[in-house]
Image (tube, rainbow, N blue to C red):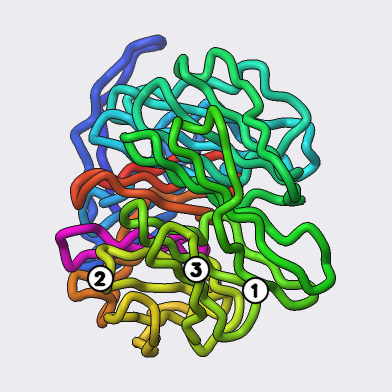
């Protein structure tokens, strides 16, 4: 594409506003990088030039970047409302933990790491703008009650986990935490329950068994109520579920390994995403799983299946996808260019969701 704009004879130091230039790029259905070069010519002699790259979108991107306060990897995000969301991460060397929070719908994000040091924060849960929990790569749980100004370790008894995969709290103070088995040999997972916002924790009456080298995945952990719990593992066809608050556990065969992400919109209907990009759907609470067509072969790192709707979102590489028919079909969504890969997503409702990346970027769907 080419275009010109010209001005008359200019005196030294004189400024002139050139007429706007418009270029038609044709119909596009996804973002396109457009190279633009501006040449300044006087009396047929080129005097100066600049080159620019512009990204053209088919419309305003559905996912827009927000001003994050960190470039450290963000591993987990929790959306609570159109205004409040939390995210956590680290540098994978346990030397740069980070927690950020927004209370104004993403207009600003604030670092609220407080006194946390020497940890990587792989999962986060929250119930409001003040109370949140993080799980670490060393098997610890920390909580804040003052919006991240200070954090305190919440010690749990008995067998200790080397890695906390997920934490989930409800507004009444009931919460669950999932930890990897304490040994690489065959053993059991660490599943904890609290009824007082984590002031005290206890192992659930039954903790599911594991084979050698088995473990869960951070954020592959979901609860719909205080009785129904699901989590994914690194084993082929092994998704664990409880319908009685962890008193007993059942296994549902998903047909694929590495269940990186899991989400249920109610006690019956759920989706799971795998490291190969495979997607499985369940309509019986996770007892059985059926393959559906996937739009990607990239690992699915985040999955949100929204209660009371037919809508679900997945995050894969640098692309978010949405389904409006319970996972049967998926459509890629536009996003401002990002430098990292999408690590996780979380939605408060169908109009407000956030995703975070390996380079500390925050994206907002609205």
| Residue that sits furthest to the top in the current view | 13
Q: Which residue is mark 3?
A: 248
Going from N to C along the chain, the mark reached first, 1 or 2, is 1
Residue at 47% across / 82% down in the picture?
252
- The answer to whether 34 is drawn above or below residue 286 in the figure is above
Q: Could you tell me which secondary element the residue under label 2 belongs to?
A: strand
Residue 220: give x, y in percent of width and height: 51, 61
Going from N to C along the chain, the mark reached first, 2 or 3, is 3
Q: Nearer the viewer, residue 234 or 72?
A: 234
Q: Is residue 244 visible?
A: yes
For the residues labelled 3 and 1, the Cα–Cα distance comes to 21 Å
- The answer to whether 72 is drawn above or below residue 110 in the figure is below
For the residues labelled 2 and 3, the Cα–Cα distance comes to 32 Å
Q: Could you tell me which secondary element the residue under label 1 belongs to?
A: loop
Q: Nearer the viewer, residue 242 or 36?
A: 242
Q: Nearer the viewer, residue 189 or 362?
A: 189
Residue 346: give x, y in percent of width and height: 37, 49
| Span of residues in magenta | 301-320
Residue 128: give x, y in percent of width and height: 34, 28
Tell me whether circle 3 and circle 1 mark residues in contact (CB < 8 Å).
Answer: no
Q: Which residue is mark 1?
A: 234
Q: Could you tell me which secondary element the residue under label 3 belongs to?
A: loop
Image quarter hosting the C terminus: top left
Going from N to C along the chain, the mark reached first, 3 or 1, is 1
Residue at 45% across / 31% down in the picture?
196
In the shown orientation, is residue 202 left or right of residue 43? right
Image quarter hosting the N terminus: bottom left
Q: Which residue is mark 2?
A: 323
| Nearer the camera: disc 1 or disc 2 | 1
Q: In which quadrant of the rendered view does residue 92 lie?
A: top right
Classified by dominant secondary structure, the portion drawn in magenta counts as: strand
- The answer to whether 209 is drawn above or below residue 309 in the figure is below
């Amino acid at each position: 594409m080419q275009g010109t704009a010209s001005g008359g004879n200019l005196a030294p130091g004189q400024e002139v506003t050139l007429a706007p230039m418009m270029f038609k790029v044709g119909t596009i259905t996804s973002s396109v990088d457009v190279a633009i070069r501006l040449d300044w010519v006087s009396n047929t002699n080129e005097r100066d030039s600049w080159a620019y790259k512009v990204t053209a979108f088919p419309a305003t991107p559905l996912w827009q970047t927000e001003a994050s306060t960190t470039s450290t990897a963000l591993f987990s995000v929790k959306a609570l409302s159109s205004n409040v969301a939390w995210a956590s991460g680290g540098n994978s060397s346990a030397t740069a933990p980070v927690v950020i929070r927004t209370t104004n719908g993403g207009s600003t994000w604030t670092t609220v790491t407080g006194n946390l040091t020497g940890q990587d924060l792989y999962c986060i849960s929250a119930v409001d703008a003040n109370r949140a929990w993080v799980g670490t790569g060393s098997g610890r749980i920390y909580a804040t009650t003052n919006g991240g100004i200070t954090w305190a370790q919440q010690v749990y008894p008995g067998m200790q986990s080397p890695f906390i995969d997920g934490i989930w709290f409800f507004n009444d103070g009931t919460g669950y935490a999932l930890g990897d088995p304490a040994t690489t040999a065959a053993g059991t997972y660490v599943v904890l329950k609290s009824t007082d916002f984590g002031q005290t924790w206890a192992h659930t009456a039954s903790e599911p068994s594991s084979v050698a080298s088995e473990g869960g995945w951070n954020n592959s952990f979901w609860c719909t109520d205080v009785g129904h719990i699901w989590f994914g593992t690194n084993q082929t066809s092994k998704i664990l579920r409880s319908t009685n608050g962890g008193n007993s556990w059942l296994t549902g065969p998903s047909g694929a390994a590495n269940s990186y992400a899991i989400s249920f919109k109610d006690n019956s209907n759920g989706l799971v995403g795998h490291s190969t990009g495979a997607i499985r759907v369940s309509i019986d609470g996770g007892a059985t799983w059926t393959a559906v067509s996937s739009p990607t072969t990239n690992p699915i790192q985040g999955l949100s299946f929204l209660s009371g709707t037919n809508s679900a979102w997945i995050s894969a590489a640098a692309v978010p996808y949405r389904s409006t028919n319970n996972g049967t079909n998926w459509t890629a969504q536009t996003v401002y260019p990002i430098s990292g890969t999408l690590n996780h997503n979380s939605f408060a409702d169908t109009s407000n969701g956030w995703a975070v990346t390996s380079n500390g970027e925050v994206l907002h769907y609205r």
